[in-house]
Image (spheres, helix red, strand yellow):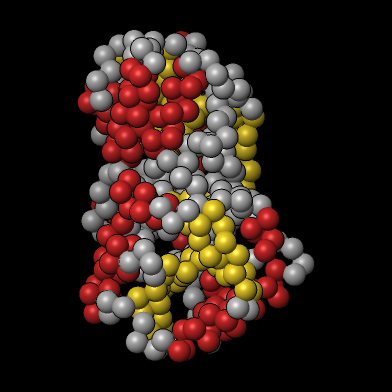
Amino acid sequence: MLIGFLINPIAGMGGRVGLKGTDGVVEEAILRGAQPVSEGKARQALRQLRHALEAGARSSDIRWLTCSGAMGEGALRATGFEDIAVVHEAVETPTAEDTRRATAAFVNAGVDLIVFCGGDGTARDIAQIAGDQVPIVGIPSGVKMYSGVYGVSAERTGEIIAQFVAGGLDCPIVDILDLDEERYRKGEWAVRLVDSARTPYQPTCTQSSKALITEHADEAFKADIAEYLDEEIRSHRTTLFVLGPGSTVKAIAERLGIVKTLLGIDALLEGAAAGADLNENALLKLLDIYPVAQLILSPIGAQGFVLGRGNLQLSPAVVRQIGIDHLTVVATPAKLKRTPVLRFDTGDLELDARLADRRFLPVITGYRRRRLVPIST
């Protein structure tokens, strides 16, 4: 099996520092204290892959084509893979052009699969070259991952690769979606279909493409949810309420007469704004002052992610400080029709396991109305 492998070293760096992406703002992310995250995610996937291959006595079944250094070779060698050929020399700060050139080298060499670690921008650049000639699969490491080519976590992506090597997966065509990061930072949700690609599909390990789900009655349900949460927030005046992104959560703030960022993380205290568009550090400072807190979030439609997609400011440290029992999930009935399970991919395996241990989460769907929704384990 010949597999092309590349890492986008800057993918996901803008998440915790509140930049909602890294395209065009790498230097600013570094100035804000951002740290690389994608190589760590890649190693998680590769360790799981190696474990699965060795369990099936197939550890020598892969020959890798990759890029030098942090763009691929380093992670492969660190996780014990040795049959490696470098086909692209990466520069210190790789660009989209490096991704496209590496992909072209993989395709020209006749690879059976391309594995990448990054976000939707990386998927877009690879699909532009690979087309439907070669299946691709992504290790999720970006801020936004709305396309259907990713595993639901780094470890599950390792399992997908292992099953592909064993010859047991079909490769349907899925959507490559991308979000305009410049407009996203201004509070506009501009998601567009940019391409399609073939991907190895494993129903319990592959995430769906994001679905924008609306029905005629949605606004009424959002108003009912907002009315109920308005009462709850006003009755807990010493609690710091941390509000995640999305229109359902935004409706709660508007009910209180507070302007909320559509796509950022905001905070309320005593019914008034306590912070807007907060990054990880700002959240931790607030939580040091106000240790009693409640987190209000809405899952991504169809994918089901409550944490780990589009809200990386809510890092494992932030979630632990708030407490996993202080999580409120809201969604309209229309969204839940297309979102059969809830998922957590914080990047911290122990925290994800604790969140999933409850098996079900009550989701507020209207005024004093809840529905139990299963958590994917």
* Residue 293 location (% of width, % of height): 35, 75
Q: Quadrant of the N terminus?
A: top left
* Residue 148 location (% of width, % of height): 57, 38
Would you place residue 361 above or below residue 150 in this image? Answer: below
Q: Quadrant of residue 44?
A: top left
Relative side of 46 to 170, left or right: left
Total number of numbered discs in the rendering: 0
* Residue 376 location (% of width, % of height): 50, 47
Asked whether the viewer can see residue 206, the reply is yes
Relative side of 131 to 276, left or right: right
Would you place residue 190 above or below residue 326 in this image? Answer: above
Q: Residue at x 44, y 56 (%)?
A: 358
* Residue 309 location (% of width, % of height): 46, 52
> Along the line of sight, which residue is nearer the eye, 80 or 101?
80
> Along the line of sight, which residue is nearer the eye, 41 or 29?
41
Q: Residue at x 29, y 62 (%)?
A: 320
Q: Residue at x 43, y 28 (%)?
A: 159
